[in-house]
Image (cartoon, helix red, strand yellow):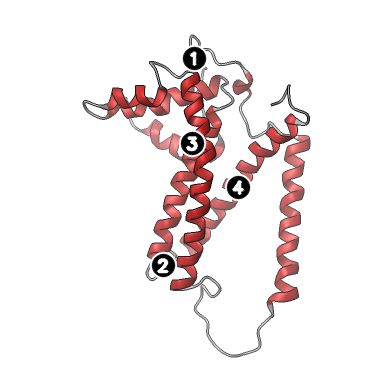
Amino acid sequence: IMRDVNNGWLIRYLHSNTASAFFFIVYLHIGRGMYYGSYRAPRTLVWTIGTVIFILMMATAFLGYVLPYGQMSLWGATVITNLMSAIPRVGQDIVEFIWGGFSVNNATLNRFFSLHFVLPFVLAALALMHLIVLHDTAGSGNPLGVSGNYERISFAPYFIFKDLITVFAFIFVLSLFVFFMPNVLGDSENYVMANPMQTPAAIVPEWYLLPFYVILRSIPN
């Protein structure tokens, strides 16, 4: 897409940097939910659906990270998929089924691309369910539980104006990354063509997957 498509560089950098921005906002959302205790009743189901959404987001991001098929993509896919081999008896069979062979290859990329395309639709359905359950249970507009009939600020134009400021600020910051420093959040090693005969000195995922990478590294062997 970088070489053969008109403005392909823009499409790729916009896609990759928007993914980072999306995860940044999601982590803020999770932090807000933990601060206000959104995991407690009556919002337990809302929190559970949100957790499922987060797990699927991680899977979607990982699948997308493999698709460029650079060094980090190849070895990241090899390491993560090989975790399945720890399952007794059937582990190695599962790994080879995911790979579509005996190593990460073109069949693996085709499967990962298909899943990377389909999962966002599943995420959209779950996000809609997340909102419906939220508004059917406790709502989200009054986290402190303050009640009263005192004068309140109307949604339009005050909150619309406030949200527009946030949207434009988001677009501005994202544009800075896309146009002036598109690779600052990536790994230069992933611009090296995948080579199964040469392992990178350090296999490190994207920043938004680092918490899970640290958990993985903390487990010996």
Which numbered marker is on residue 199?
Answer: 1
Mark 4, mark 1: which one is toward the viewer? 4
Q: Is residue 156 left or right of residue 103?
A: right
Q: The residue under label 2 is which amino acid type?
A: Arg
Count of labels in the image: 4
Q: Earlier in the sequence, mark 4 or mark 2?
A: 4
Q: CA distance from mark 1 to mark 3?
A: 26 Å
The CA distance from mark 1 to mark 2 is: 46 Å
| Structural distance between the alpha carbons of marks 4 and 1 | 30 Å
Q: Amino acid at mark 3?
A: Leu
* Rendered residue at 60%/47% (across/down): 22
Estimate the x, y position of residue 14 in percent, counting from the top left.
Answer: 70, 39
Q: Label 4, label 3: how many angstroms apart (C-alpha)?
A: 19 Å
Answer few, some or many: residues within 10 Å of disc 2's Cα (few below 14, many 20 plus, some between 14 and 19).
Answer: some
Please name the residue shown 42% across and 53% down the image. 51
- Closer to the eye: label 2 or 3: 3
Question: Which residue in the protein does label 4 denote?
Answer: 22
Up the image or down, 50 lies above or below 5; here it is below
Label 2 or label 3, whichever comes before in sequence order: 2
- Label 2: state its secondary structure: loop
Residue 11 picture quarter: top right
Local SS, label 3? helix
Please report whichever mark, 1 or 2, sits nearer to the chain's N-terminal start.
2
Which of the two labelled residues, at mark 4 and mark 1, occupies the earlier sequence position? Answer: 4
Disc nearer the start of the sequence (1/3): 3
Give the residue pinned by disc 3.
Answer: 115
Instruction: Give the amino acid type for the residue marked by disc 4 in the picture.
Output: Phe
Disc number at residue 18? none
The answer to whether 14 appears left or right of 19 in the picture is: right
* Residue farthest to the left, as pictured: 89
Residue 43: which disc? 2
The three-letter code of the residue at mark 1 reads Thr
